[in-house]
Image (cartoon, rainbow, N blue to C red):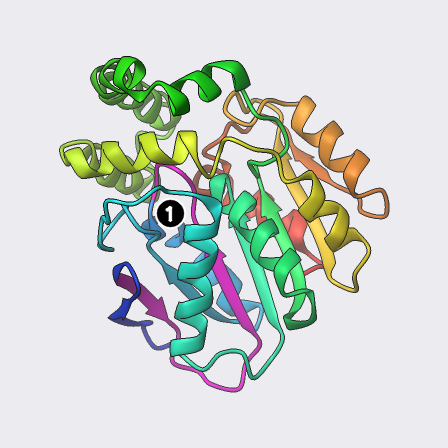
Amino acid sequence: MDDPQKFYLDLKHGRTYCELDPEEGKPMLVCIHGWSTASYVWKGLRPKLREKGYRVLTFDLYGRGKSSRPDVEHTTDLFVDQLSQLLGALNLYSQRLNIVGYSMGGAIAASFVASRVDDVERLLLIAPAGMVVRFPVLRFVARNVPIVFDPILRAGLPKALESQFKDAAKDYPNDVGVQQVLANQLAELQNKDYIEALLSSLKGALASSKRGQHQLISQSNVKVKAIFADQDKTIPHPYAKLRFDKWNQQVVSRVIEGAGHAVTYTHIPEIMAEAKGFL
């Protein structure tokens, strides 16, 4: 297989970095990464998805990776608009889309799909946000009294995330893919605009449930599947799965045993096994 094309597109809020497989005519699969990663998180899964016959598009959300870091509120609407503009610029609405969303990307994916159910064939969610909003009162206060909480979060986030990133990778010292994700995450921590993007997303894209969006999707013809991780502390198991199952009663969700929130890059064979027959 030929390497994906790597390029930038100028969108409303700045440049967006993309990688798009060159094979036209294949079903389009769009991957949306999470809160603290960028499109590099799909490097291990991408060839497996291509083997399934898909043309894969990955991109960096604003504030992460190689995309611009605009000084705007990082809401779900911002990222849905980014994706919509991206797909329009690439003329990819000519066929029904397949969407994969991981972590915060799962919340963004649900919102995007709910707004365009007629354009989407299937939706695969991996450890998706949008089910359980953690610390809702604290998020509300932080959003409304930023002068108090922003300095605290700015000071505490880098150290907390460094520990979290290293903990996720500690059991995979010889896995090149896992260690590369860790290296990329640690490098991002050196950029203050990355921290600002994370902080804004905590108060924006991650501050509300996606109940309405999931219920709308469940009433459409979009095929849906969700994969959770039983050791996930970020998208707390089993509460997130229970909420998803309640909102999507015609859908069977699955759990990968022994996996944490980093499941997308630590448990690639297990994800592909669970996706068998769906993708």
The magenta stretch spans which residues? 15-37
At horizontal 52% and vertical 49% (from top left) the residue drawn is: 108
Location of residue 182 in the rendering, given as x and y in whole percent from the top left corner:
28, 35
Q: Could you say where residue 202 lies in the image, as x and y percent from the top left?
A: 41, 30
Q: Can residue 53 be seen in the rendering of this structure?
A: yes
Task: Check disc 1 and report its element: helix, strand or loop.
Answer: helix
Q: Is residue 101 above or below residue 223?
A: above
Q: Report which residue position mark 1 lands on.
A: 41
The spot of residue 92 in percent (x, y) is 49, 78
Any magenta on residue 32? yes
Q: Is residue 238 visible?
A: no
Q: Label 1: how many residues lie within 10 Å, few (<14), some (14-19) or many (20+)? A: many
Q: Quadrant of the C terminus?
A: bottom right
- Residue occupying image coordinates x 24% and y 32%: 195
Q: Quadrant of the N terminus?
A: bottom left
Lateral position of residue 223 relative to residue 160, left or right? right
Relative to 256, say whether 162 is above or below: above
Horizontal and vertical percent position of residue 116: 63, 65
Apparent side of residue 271 relative to residue 23 in the rendered image (left or right): right
Q: Is residue 40 above or below residue 147?
A: below
Pick the front one: 265 or 215: 215
- The residue at the point 62 percent across, 53 percent down is 124
Q: Is residue 140 magenta?
A: no
